[in-house]
Amino acid sequence: MDQDQPGNPVYVSCPLSNEVLSGERDIDNLTFDYRGLSRRGISMMGDEIVEIDSVKHAVVGKGGAVYNYDKLILAPGVSFDFGAIDGMSAELADTRIQHAWKAGAQTRLLRQQLKAMPDGGLCAIVATPNPFRCPPGPYERAAQIALYFSHHKPKSKVMIFDAKDAFSKQALFQAGWKEHYGDMIEWIPAAAGGEIEAIDADSMTLTGVVEDFHADVISLIPRQRAAELAFANGLTDASGWCPVDQQTFASTQHPDIHVIGDAVIAGEMPKSGYAANSQGKVCAMAVVAALNGQPAPAPS
Ligand SMILES: Cc1cc2nc3c(=O)[nH]c(=O)nc-3n(C[C@H](O)[C@H](O)[C@H](O)COP(=O)(O)OP(=O)(O)OC[C@H]3O[C@@H](n4cnc5c(N)ncnc54)[C@H](O)[C@@H]3O)c2cc1C
């Protein structure tokens, strides 16, 4: 079982998964079980939660099990809006046009496609508008693919089609690309026609605002929003993300439900594992304080 799915006994780390694409790392090396938590006395239920009853303070698992709570902490991650680009679908992502933005089976498939691509081919990365999980991720992915090409397929190219005109750590990335891979990576910002409106997977064609592009391998990273569990249970707002009190990470909609990680909008904090980890600590301290009748500590 190598795909992170709700209730799975393993978790596949997105951080470092771009290195699987260059062949520098095996995905088994990024696959973790939860024994570390069990050793700390945390009970792992291995269940997918399908419903939150904020009135009864209970969550319901896929098989009907009911778990009661005083405080509920959710870190459900992101979901994808495939409809924003014509011709794109969840089915295509699982078969031919991988986003690999939840590491696992799609990461392996994308690696296989890169290996099968002839030298002289083009790999297109379609980068999504803000906000999204891991702002530097698409640009790190370009570098890892170029690393593989430079050793094994030196006539090949990576093109990034972007819905934005600027990106995280842009100057560093562009200097690094140039230094290590020459002209192998090309970034096309929205202002230069980088925004993609449609995809035809049969002809491997991307329809841009200005012109069409053919590619041999396409990694299309879809627009993102909070995970379905948050949507279905009224924890999101019009932005598609979960608003929270940033001192406690309590949902502004349901005060006994706390949300952390990529699903929240929390000021300038990026959707990164690093931020999720910090939010978890702030949230845990606030929940412990509340259960002890104390005021929430003031985080820095
Ligand atoms: C290519 C890539 C590279 C990255 N590199 C970095 C990096 O170098 N550094 C960094 O800090 N961050 C990095 N990130 C970002 C990082 O992976 C995320 O920010 C982080 O995983 C967010 O954690 P989360 O808990 O919010 O969501 P997730 O890690 O997605 O965890 C959510 C969990 O909730 C489970 N879940 C969802 N719904 C349910 C349900 N209904 N019932 C039960 N379980 C459910 C999911 O199965 C999943 O296990 C990277 C991301 C990508 C895509």
Image (cartoon, rainbow, N blue to C red):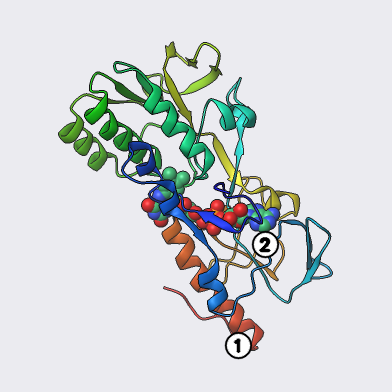
**Cα distance between the residues tagged 2 and 1:** 32 Å
| Disc number lying in front (2 or 1) | 2
- Please tell me whether residue 158 is drawn above or below residue 48 in the rendered image: above
- Please tell me whether residue 230 is drawn above or below residue 156 in the rendered image: below
Residue 135, percent from left and from top: 41, 45
Q: Is residue 242 visible?
A: no
Q: Quadrant of residue 63?
A: bottom right
Q: Quadrant of residue 169?
A: top left
Residue 232, percent from left and from top: 75, 50
Q: Residue at x 83, y 67 (%)?
A: 55
Q: Secondary structure at mark 2?
A: loop
Report the number of discs: 2
Q: Which residue is mark 1?
A: 294
Q: Nearer the viewer, residue 17 or 74?
A: 17
Q: Is residue 255 visible?
A: yes
Crowding at mark 1 (Cα within 10 Å: few <14, some 14-19, many 20+): few
Numbered circle sitting on residue 46: 2
